[in-house]
Structure formats: C-alpha cells, structure tokens
Amino acid sequence: MGVIKDGTISGVVPEPGGFLVHYPAYPSSISRAVDTLGGIQGILKARSSQSNNLELRFRPEDPYSHPAFGELRPTNTLLLKISKRKSPCVRETEEASSSSGVKNGEQENQPESERKQEESLCADIVARVTDAYFFDG
C-alpha cells in the first residue's frame, strides 16, 4: 500500500505477477471467456509456445467459426484493486454520534454531497504486468 505525503504517492511496486488478455468483447461470465480462449489448457499452451499467439473462438462449440488471434506484446502495466473506504474522520464522528444518542437514520437525511465526502476511493497496486495479449484483427 502506498503512502500519500505532500500530494505524492510513494510505495513499493511488486514484482511481475501475471499477464493480461485484452479481451475484445463482453463475455457473459469469466468461465465463458476462459472457454473461448481454449480453457486453462489452451491458455497454458499459448504461454509456453514460441508463436506468442493466443487463439480466441467466440463460438467454441461451432467447428466452422474462425478464430481471432491475440499477439503477445510487452507492456508496462499495473494491476490495481480499487475499493471504496470510509475516511477515518467519518468513523470518529460515527462513534461520537452513537455515544451521544444520534441515530444512524439521521445520517440518511444528510445532503448527498456530504455522504459522498464520507467515502473515498482507494487504489492498491496488486501486481506489475509485463506481458499482454492484444486482439487487433
């Protein structure tokens, strides 16, 4: 996790941890996307082969569908985990309001702009990615 000081973020970038597939569609599920890439075995075969191509069949059950090929290219990418967190000062005010008898329902009456300020987006670096498959065709 990075530390924010004077408007800059500092921290340790993790070692390479995987590869990316820039999937050229919106699959109905992750398992469907893996199936169209040839399953786990097909992905592992593409990773170990010298051709640097990953085969994608949008209809793997249809023997007449033509595959699209993704080319492996080097990339310098970070994989981020983005989450919503309540700010620390909000927790203190919630504890103070609960001890003073203020109900949580009263917080619902706050303006929307104040509620948005209570939650903040946090981005944690999960991995550094050095390779990615791109489908250009």
Image (tube, rainbow, N blue to C red):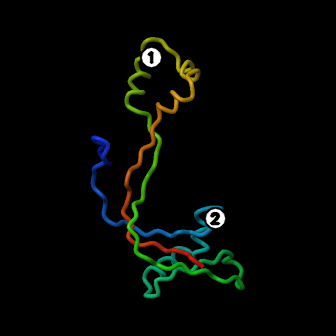
Marked residue nearer the N-terminal end (2 or 1)? 2
Secondary structure under tag 2 reads loop
Q: Nearer the viewer, residue 79 or 17?
A: 79
Q: Position of residue 95 (x, y in %)?
A: 41, 21
Query: What amino acid type is highlighted by mark number 1?
Result: Ser
User: Crowding at label 2, few (<14), some or many (≥20) Cα neighbours within 10 Å?
Assistant: few
Q: Which residue is disc 1 drawn over?
A: 97
Q: Nearer the viewer, residue 66 or 3?
A: 3
Q: Horizontal placement of 44 versus 26: left or right?
A: left
Q: Horizontal placement of 123 versus 33: left or right?
A: left
Q: Horizontal placement of 90 versus 69: left or right?
A: left
User: Crowding at label 1, few (<14), some or many (≥20) Cα neighbours within 10 Å?
Assistant: some
The residue positioned 40% from the left and 68% from the top of the image is 18
Separation (CA) of disc 2 from disc 1: 46 Å
Q: Position of residue 98 (x, y in %)?
A: 45, 17
Q: Name the image quarter holding residue 58.
A: bottom right
Residue at the outermost front position: 7
Q: Which mark is residue 19?
A: none
Query: What amino acid type is highlighted by mark number 2?
Result: Pro
Q: Name the image quarter holding residue 14.
A: bottom left
Q: How many marks?
A: 2
Q: Which mark is residue 27?
A: 2
The residue positioned 28% from the left and 41% from the top of the image is 6
The residue positioned 42% from the left and 59% from the top of the image is 79
Q: Position of residue 38 (x, y in %)?
A: 57, 77
Secondary structure under tag 1 reads helix
The residue positioned 52% from the left and 16% from the top of the image is 103
Q: Name the image quarter holding residue 7.
A: top left
Give the vertical position of 98 relative to 7 (above or below).
Answer: above
Give the vertical position of 41 relative to 124 (above or below).
Answer: below
